[in-house]
Each structure stands twice: as C-alpha cells, then as structure tokens.
Amino acid sequence: MTKSIFTLALHAGSPPAPDFIPVVPPIYTAVTYTYPFMKDMEAVFSGEKSGYVYARHGAPTTASLEKAVAALEGGDAALAFSSGMAAIHAALLATGIKKEDCILAANDLYGATRTLLAQHYQNMGIKTYFVDIFNLQQVEDTLETAAPKVLFFESISNPLLRVANIPELTALAHQYNTRVIVDSTFATPYLITPLQHGADLVVHSSTKYISGHGDALGGVVTYHREFQEPLYDISKMLGATLGPFEAYLTLRGLKTLPLRMKRHCENALAVAECLKKNPRIRAVHYPGLSTHPHHDLASRLYEEKGYGGVVTFEIKNAGQKEVFAFFEALTLITPATSLGDIYSLILYPVHASHRGLTSEERKSVGITEGMVRLSVGIEDSRDIIADIEQGLQSL
Ligand SMILES: *Cc1c(COP(=O)(O)O)cnc(C)c1O
C-alpha cells in the first residue's frame, strides 16, 4: 500500500545509506542520530565508541572543523563553540578552576575577557591578578605568592600589538604548576602554534581570521589529550555549541587561512611602513617595524613568516572629532568593530574595545585619544594606503 501524503512528506526524503563520498563535508543539520543496531547507539552514548547521538554532544560538520583546527594547531583535539567568549569560558573551566582559586592574566586583554574575569569570575569567588606579562619578575612574583591555577594571555595584544613570549611564559608558569591558556586569535596558527611552545590550551575567536569572511561567529579550543574529558563535559553543560551552518562557513574559510594570512601580513607591513612616513601620523604600532619593542622577538617566534594583519596608529593632534571625520572620509576601509576579515576594517579603541575604561585607565595602558586600529584586509595594499591618505588629507 502506498503511504499517505502525511507520511511521505515526512519520510520520503530520509537519507539513504551512503555509497558515495562527498568531496566537501556536508552540512549535517540533524539534532539526533540513529543506528541500525541499538547496541551501537548505547556504545556511543556511554562513550565507548565514537559517533553522534545528539548535536549538543557533537555533530559531524562541527567535528570536521574541529579536526582541521586541531591539525593546524598541532593539538590532540579541538572543540568548537558558538563564540570566542564561550571558548574562553570553557577553556578556563576545563583547568578545574573553582571558588577560591585564582588566575594570573595579562593586563591588556580583549575587553570582554577582562570583564569576564574582573566581574563575573570575581563574583564567583575566583580572583584575577592582572599583571604586565612583559615584566617577567612581576609574573614570577605573582606565581610564587598567589599560586594561580591558570595563566591567561593573548599571543598578540590589542590594540598595541605587544608580542607575548609564549615559550618563556609557559616554562615559568609550569615551574609553579600553573596551567597556561593562550588566546591566539591575532596570531593564528599561521604565525605560531602555542601548544608546541608549551601552552596547555589554545583558544581562538574563529569569528576573526580562522573563518575570515565576517559571516560566522564562533570559537575553538585546541588542547592536549588530558583535557579531553573535562572540556567535553563542560562543552555539553555550557551548551554554547557551534551550529552546523557556522561550522561549515568556518571550515570553508579555514581552507584559505594561510593564503589570507600571508597576504594580511604583507599588506599590513606595507601600510605600516607607509604610515610611518606620513607627517600627519604621530606613531605607528606594528611588530613588523624595527622600531616596535618586540620586533626581534616576533621575528624569532614567527620565523619571519609575518607580523600579523593589524596595524595601530595615532593621528597627530586628533581626538574623537578628528578620528570620526577621518572614518567618515574613508571610501574603502569600513569603520566597524571586529578584525581578521578579508575586508579592511577600522575601529576607534576609545569607543569600542576599550570603552569600559576611564580616560586615565586608557592612558595607563597606552591608549590615546587619536589612536585607531586598522585590520588590514586582502585588497591591494596600494588601494588601502590611498584610502588612508585621502582620509587624512580631508582633516
Ligand atoms: C573577538 C575576540 C574575542 C571574543 O570572541 P567572540 O567571537 O566575539 O566571542 C576574544 N579574544 C580576542 C583576542 C578577540 O579578538
């Protein structure tokens, strides 16, 4: 008997047993997975066998992305999350941190990370000591006196683009049994793989360079095997799972990460060198310039592959009014928050990433009223430079 339209509409398109292999990982939207033999489903549920049962516990499209990121970072495995912040939160919890433990963190962290630690973790009874990670004595003193569970810092800081000495910091932290988490969003595995320099966990906002096209929010944690159990458990309980569409877009973006990064780095260096000669510019911060305090360190750590795609510069005698006029005069570069897109993006730290700070606090971390942060895209560098120059001329 042929089935009713009500039944056919539901079941006629059900997947056949595959006898072909798609060349590109498919977007699996299924929330649940079934097995011909119930003992197999049971084995997957209990963790005896790898597989999928429910999308919050893992799903095939996201797993393809995780496998790719783990391979690029040189980790045993990776887990993807719905945002960079969710990845950071999960990585911190995976270290086993709990009430009355403390954290040692760099004082120039991404704004939301700083708020997560200084407010939300603080309220849960976890104190964070913010230190200058370029002052090793200060780092060691805090490791010794506070015995923090975790050291957290970024591979390249924002907006001053200070380059963390990952091998030195991880070696020091491990002497005190402190776990190390590196947020490597700005450097990407193209420039450095922190796990290979001793880090315990690496986090990325994949929203930025990893996906690279400004169309998929996400985060990834890459780690050594020992963190598999706690991280996987936290991921299931946190529930900030990356959806299959974002996983697909991110994986698609990742395929060209090295090509894009090579170009971002070349363009950023060209822009930085040009800005340095411009009389309307007071200062240029870019680790690729020999005047940057961490130029030699960056050359060594990144093996001269490049210095990242972000350039920060200060416009002479400028405050908010002049910076806004400059932004509005730009015709190619887009004033918008975020970074790491193929398109050039520009941002005013005073109003965006460092909005929560008072003007005194900003001054203490080196952020001035005329400072702008440019995420150099993969356009032709001559067009990017021409846009900046005409924008400055309009002032
Ligand atoms: C953007 C960013 C984050 C947060 O990532 P989301 O994907 O926005 O949650 C964390 N760290 C750094 C360095 C970032 O640039």
Image: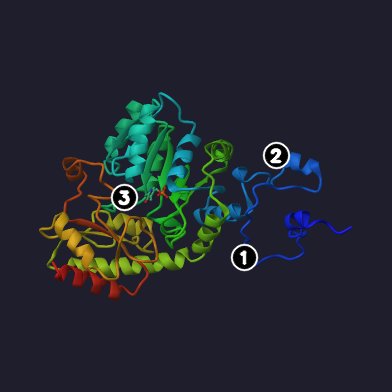
- Closer to the chain start, of discs 3 and 1, is 1
Q: Residue at x 47, y 56 (%)?
A: 216
Left or right, residue 186 beside residue 237? left
Quadrant assignment, res 44: top right
Q: Residue 45: which numbered mark, if any?
A: 2
Q: Please, which residue is most extreme toward the left here?
A: 317
Q: Residue under label 1, please give it.
A: 24
Q: Residue 393's spot in the image, x, y percent?
A: 15, 71
**Foreground residue, 312 or 337?**
337
- Kindly tell me whether mark 1's CB lies below 8 Å from ligand 1: no
Label 3 neighbour load within 10 Å: few <14, some 14-19, many 20+:
many
Q: Residue 371's spot in the image, x, y percent?
A: 20, 55
Q: Residue 177's spot in the image, x, y percent?
A: 44, 32
**Foreground residue, 371 or 266?**
371
Specify the amino acid type for callout 3: Ser
Q: Residue under label 3, please give it.
A: 157
Q: Please, which residue is most extreme toward the top here?
A: 100
Q: Are marks 3 and 2 in contact (CB under 8 Å)?
A: no
At mark 3, the secondary structure is loop
- Closer to the chain start, of discs 2 and 1, is 1
Left or right, residue 49 beside residue 297? right
Considering the image in quadrants, where does the C terminus appear? bottom left
At mark 2, the secondary structure is helix
Specify the amino acid type for callout 2: Phe
At mark 1, the secondary structure is loop
* Gap in angstroms between the C-alphas marked 2 and 1: 27 Å
